[in-house]
């Protein structure tokens, strides 16, 4: 394994589940529909009818719910008990009769747990594996859960070299702050992450358009994602080629890549090499 930049799990851990709990109040039919559309576009499949779907690090449970609504049999798990509770709440609200949706607490780094999971048509993990503290081990475990004709869909932080190391320091500071100061600190980075886009929108005569568009993209919340970006530890990054080579060596071929040039996640879709 040859990660381009490694940050170990000795770092403080960001309260991902607490962030998802706050986001849950924003979930509505529109956001769920956008999540469904996002899955369809990412996987290039209009329906998941008859498919088995594993959601590694399910967070709020939004994309597990989307997969259920698209017809899949879904198993969701998360390391954080608050995230598990969020997913269970979402199921109670929007899919109370979804007996094909199992939600449980577990870790992709727990080999005894992983070995009991079996294999799946679609293994999905968006923005999760780089927060485990052992990203390459987590990716390897995820690869092993893809069945012989299956797909792996993951999103991982883009490696920006020095900028990524700077963001690690920003995250460390956030996690060392008292709870009351964390939102204030996170808001300081709004101009960095949203300033140039907001200026472009203003010049085009469409103020806040990008912010509103982001809210519909994947059904997510710009503020929740900002807090995740500023505070999310553990934190690892990777170049696309490193990820592609790593997965190819383990029997997967790249079939889709949404690549970015700056902050954020590259999205990868792999299929098992026949």
Image: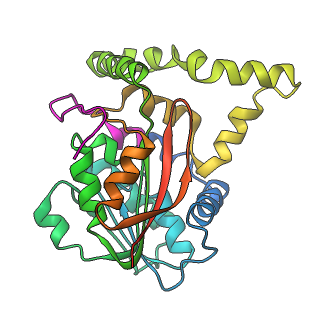
The correct choice, above or below, for 148 with respect to 172 in the image is: below
Say which quarter of the image contains residue 193: top right
Q: Residue furthest right?
A: 205
Say which quarter of the image contains residue 148: bottom left
In this picture, residue 99 sits left or right of residue 30: left
Give the colour scheme shown.
Answer: rainbow
Looking at the picture, tell me which residue is in the foreground, 181 or 222: 222
Residue 223 spot, x, y in % from top left:
54, 32
For the point 67% across and 56% down, the residue is 30
Looking at the picture, tell me which residue is in the foreground, 181 or 47: 47
Quarter of the image with the C terminus in it: bottom left
In this picture, residue 181 sits left or right of residue 234: right
Looking at the picture, tell me which residue is in the foreground, 91 or 47: 47
In this picture, residue 114 sits left or right of residue 32: left
For the point 50% across and 50% down, the residue is 267
Region of the chain picked out in magenta, as a range: 1-21
Whether 271 is among the magenta residues is no
For the point 58% across and 35% down, the residue is 222
Whether 19 is among the magenta residues is yes
For the point 29% across and 54% down, the residue is 139
């Amino acid at each position: 394994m040859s990660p381009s930049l490694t940050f170990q799990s000795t770092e403080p851990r960001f309260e991902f589940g607490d962030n998802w709990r706050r986001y849950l109040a924003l979930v509505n039919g529109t956001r769920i529909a956008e999540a469904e559309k996002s899955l369809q576009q990412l996987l290039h499949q209009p329906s998941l009818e008859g498919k088995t779907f594993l959601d590694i690090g399910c967070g709020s449970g939004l994309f597990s719910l989307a997969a259920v609504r698209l017809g899949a049999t879904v198993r969701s798990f998360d390391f954080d008990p608050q995230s598990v509770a969020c997913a269970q709440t979402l199921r109670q609200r929007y899919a109370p009769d979804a007996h094909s949706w199992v939600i449980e607490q577990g870790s992709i780094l727990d080999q005894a747990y992983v070995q009991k999971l079996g294999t799946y048509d679609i293994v999905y993990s968006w923005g999760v594996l780089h927060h485990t503290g052992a990203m390459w081990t987590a990716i390897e475990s995820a690869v092993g859960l893809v069945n012989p004709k299956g797909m792996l869909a993951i999103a991982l932080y883009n490696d920006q070299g020095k900028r990524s190391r700077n963001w690690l320091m920003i995250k460390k500071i956030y996690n060392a702050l008292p709870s009351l100061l964390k939102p204030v600190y996170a808001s300081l980075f709004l101009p960095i992450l949203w300033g140039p886009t907001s200026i472009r929108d203003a010049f085009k005569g469409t103020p806040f358009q990008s912010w509103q568009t982001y809210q519909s993209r994947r059904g997510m919340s710009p503020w929740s994602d900002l807090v995740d970006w500023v505070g999310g530890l553990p934190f690892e990054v990777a170049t696309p080629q490193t990820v592609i080579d790593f997965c190819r060596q383990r029997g997967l071929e790249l079939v889709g890549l949404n690549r970015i040039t700056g902050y954020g996640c590259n999205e990868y879709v792999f299929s098992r090499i026949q």
